[in-house]
Amino acid sequence: MIWKWLGALLLFPVQMVYLMVKAAVCLVLPPKLRDLSQENVLVTGGGRGIGRHLAREFARRGARKIILWGRTEKCLKETMEEIRMMGTECHYFICDVGNREEVYRQAKAVREKVGDITILVNNAAVVHGKSLMDSDDDALLKSQHINTLGQFWTTKAFLPRMLELQNGHIVCLNSVLALSAIPGAIDYCTSKASSFAFMESLTLGLLDCPGVNATTVLPFHTSTEMFQGMRIRFPSLFPPLKPETVARRTVEAVQLNQAFLLLPWTMHVLVILKSILPQAALEEIHKFSGSYTCMNTFKGRT
């Protein structure tokens, strides 16, 4: 037993070096992208914003079928027609992912009408955009139900069949605010942090499940209606991401089987600084960057 543990201890650093060298080689050599031609992709919040761009990108890259979930039929129908014009089969279902019974009911309807889902993209989210004391209790609950608990229900609805097929991918459109919160969006930051923990645990739990993987995307502020009115102090230095860029990089991460993706790459610096700097220094960075006051002009989706 001692020799077994000793052998594992000696092998561990060798494995680490091998994996780092492998990752470095992959950065240099052109990667092989996963073929999406047999994949049925379901995108929650797929009627507008990043969700609509994700549906377009999956269709552009050859996904077999696109399924849209959302709460606004007009937006879902417009996106569906656009995807069909691209030559890809597309369907939509009215579904509030924060409603557990509705998720399970519509998941059953999807399987009966369209077939098995092999890529689930948890994109649906809401933001109340107020401080704790100014927040409405029902609005706070709504954020947690949609942004966090909704992923529990959708994943529980579709993951079992993926495990049976040994083919599946769970994708979460999260936010860098899960790692570095700001004032004025306490509901969103809390729900995204919970969502990040959910995906981190799920990703590790899938390590022994052949053919089933997970990807978590953590983008910086993206120029969509949901965060309309949010102001960054130095927009030329930290420009908001374009939703089509987030969609493209997300689909690429799925095709590369990348577990975690921070957008842009400079967000890695933020994570490192947060882990080594004292709290007082971090507070000064927030003040300098304007993140303390960026939600003061927030309007949200109209």
Image: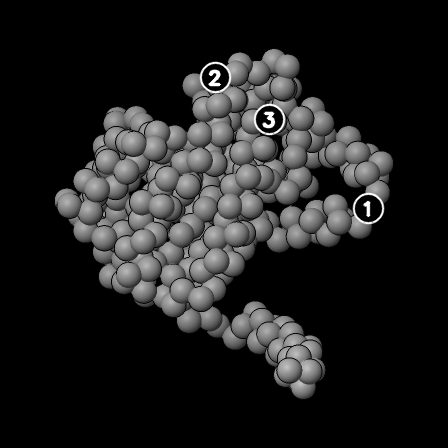
Question: Is any part of residue 190 visible from this angle?
Answer: yes
Which mark lies nearer to you, 1 or 2?
Answer: 2
| Residue 277, numbered label | 1
Within the image, what quadrant is residue 168 found in?
Answer: bottom left
Residue 186 in the image: state x and y as whole percent. Answer: 61, 27
Q: Is label 3 in a helix, a strand or a loop?
A: loop
Residue 57 in the image: state x and y as whole percent. Answer: 35, 50
Task: Of the two numbered discs 3 and 1 on the same chain, state the one appearing first in sequence.
Answer: 3
Task: Of the two numbered discs 3 and 2 on the same chain, state the one appearing first in sequence.
Answer: 2
Q: Amino acid at mark 1?
A: Leu
Quick one: quadrant of the N terminus? bottom right
Instruction: Name the residue rendered at 47%, 36% in the picture.
Output: 148
Residue 216 in the image: state x and y as whole percent. Answer: 50, 50
Question: Up-down: is 296 above or below 147?
Answer: above
Question: Is any part of residue 51 visible from this angle?
Answer: no
Within the image, what quadrant is residue 149 found in?
Answer: top left
Dot 3 and dot 1 residues touching (CB under 8 Å): no
Residue at numbered disc 2: 138
Task: Of the two numbered discs 1 and 2 on the same chain, state the one appearing first in sequence.
Answer: 2
**How many residues crowd mark 1 within 10 Å: few (<14), some (14–19), many (20+)?**
few
Residue at numbered disc 3: 185
Q: Amino acid at mark 2?
A: Asp
Q: Is label 1 in a helix, a strand or a loop?
A: loop
Q: CA distance from mark 1 to mark 2?
A: 36 Å
Quick one: quadrant of the C terminus? top left
Q: Amino acid at mark 3?
A: Ala
Question: Up-down: is 206 above or below 121?
Answer: below
